[in-house]
Image (cartoon, grey):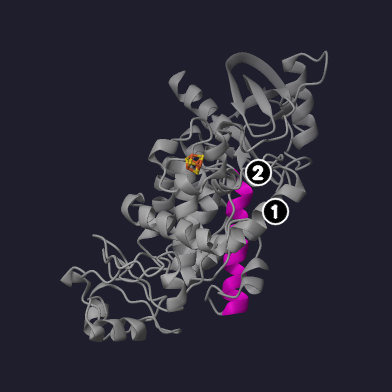
Amino acid sequence: MLTKFNTIRLQRHLLAWFRKNKRDLPWRRTRDPYRIWVSEVMLQQTQVATALPHYRRFLARFPTVEALAEASDQAVLKVWQGLGYYRRAMNLRAAARAVVRDHGGRIPDDPAAFAALPGVGRYTCGAVLSIAFGRRLAALDGNAVRVIARWLALTQTVDRPATRAKLWSAAEALVPERGAVPFSRRCEKGAVPLSGGSLEQLTVGFSGNSRGGQSCPPRHGTPGHGRSAAGKTARRAACEKGAVPLYGAAASKKGTAPFSEKPEKGAVPFFSNPPGDWNQAVMELGATVCLPRGPRCGECPVCRHCRAAAKGIQDRIPARRRRKPIPHIEVGAGIIWRHGRVLLCKRRADAMLGGLWEFPGGKRRPGESVQRCIRRELMEECALPVTVGKHLIDVTHTYTHLRVTLRVYHCRAGAGRLKLLGCDDARWVRPQDIARYPLPAADVKILEALFSAG
Ligand code: SF4
């Protein structure tokens, strides 16, 4: 593990880099815990570019935790459509209901209470509470695993529970105190001094080096950022334990503002949030510099602290278990017509893609023709006899653990009432209304083919 001395230097270098280089993302412009929570859930297993439009749409539709709590399954899944991992959306809605019911609509900042909400795991708990409330908690996602494993030159397989435990404990040790001041005394352009914490920590790593105490740009407008004795005293006062960080204009007006106060639109946080900034900085480094393949060590702000780079083994870290090849299955699916309408079935809530609507069908058995598979599946799913007609399209979609090829045929429904044997609901829908239903990605492609075929 890194010594305290090196940890503080590492924190200082990475946080300074983050301040200057972080991407301007909408969830970084707010301290609203609900918005931060939504972003963290969306960003799991999802690239920033993919999450961005969904984040905006989701918050336009459900701007508060109360609005989300009142929403129907279908409304939530429809806005989530295209992001995948739909269980996240259902858990988020269930958690919103618990927040309204048990916490009066306020997202709890207590780790035990927040982690008890549906779908909140260790990562989400650490990320949301550190970023929104300044809690000193680690957040270890895939990017952070890679970065920390490289800093420590950890060559063990990171999928093993023992290695994960080691990484979590390293991640926790690295998160700065909320009141710590791991920055240079030099107020670089754009630097954000932190309040609270001990001056002893501030001085670690400088050993009396007189570079400290340079004048700050006047725009900082904070007492204590000059080189005079009075300034030093004021700085000490500003850094006393319990001092509260300020935002923009509020800093120069009154001298106090609650840490969790939402900054005015466009305001830059005057004082920062070391635990939240740190977690974001580690993940940002992983996303933009310490890449899985070809880490850009030449541009890395913390290269001097990285043991893997020193040993030249960064490309071999993190080591992972060799994955088994993912299985590939074939599915027969039908566009089932009756009186100009098409049958849509709602997948069982506890199944993969639970709650989404689909063109019905199922897995083809060995030796079975696709047509026979569709007839059998429709009888099993909703007791409906069908006649299979023309082929429409084949669609292949890859999930994390499964590759599926859907072979899709037009079908005509026979007589008889629908029975819900293998699905939660079934409806005859006009083709122009199908897009109102939340559909899996593969079914969206089928719908496009249906319309382009006329
Ligand atoms: S030096 Fe290279 S391997 Fe180490 S943290 Fe930086 S980018 Fe990653």
Q: Give 57 or 26, whichever is nearer the viewer.
A: 26
* Disc ID at residue 166: 1
Magenta highlight on residue 32: no
Left or right, residue 318 beside residue 156: left
Q: Which residues are magenta?
A: 85-103
Residue situated furthest left in the rendering: 218
Q: Residue at x 56, y 35 (%)?
A: 314
Q: Residues within 10 Å of mark 2 (few under 14, many from 20)?
A: many
Q: Give 206 or 249, whichever is nearer the viewer.
A: 206
Percent across and percent down for residue 17 are: 37, 52
Q: Residue at x 66, y 25 (%)?
A: 404
Percent across and percent down for residue 293 are: 52, 30
Percent across and percent down for residue 267 are: 27, 67
Q: Which three-letter amino acid code belongs to the residue tagged 2?
A: Leu
Magenta highlight on residue 95: yes
**Viewer can see residue 447:** yes
Q: Give 13 or 38, whichever is nearer the viewer.
A: 13
Does 73 appear above or below 243?
A: above
* Disc ID at residue 227: none
Asked if the residue at tag 2 contacts the one at tag 1, i.e. Cβ–Cβ closer than 8 Å, the answer is yes
Q: Which three-letter amino acid code belongs to the residue tagged 1?
A: Lys
Left or right, residue 356 beside residue 325: left
Give the prevailing secondary structure in the magenta stretch: helix
Residue position marked by numbered label 2 in the rendering = 154
- Mark 1 or mark 2: name the one nearer the start of the chain: 2
Q: Of discs 1 and 2, which sits in the foreground?
A: 2
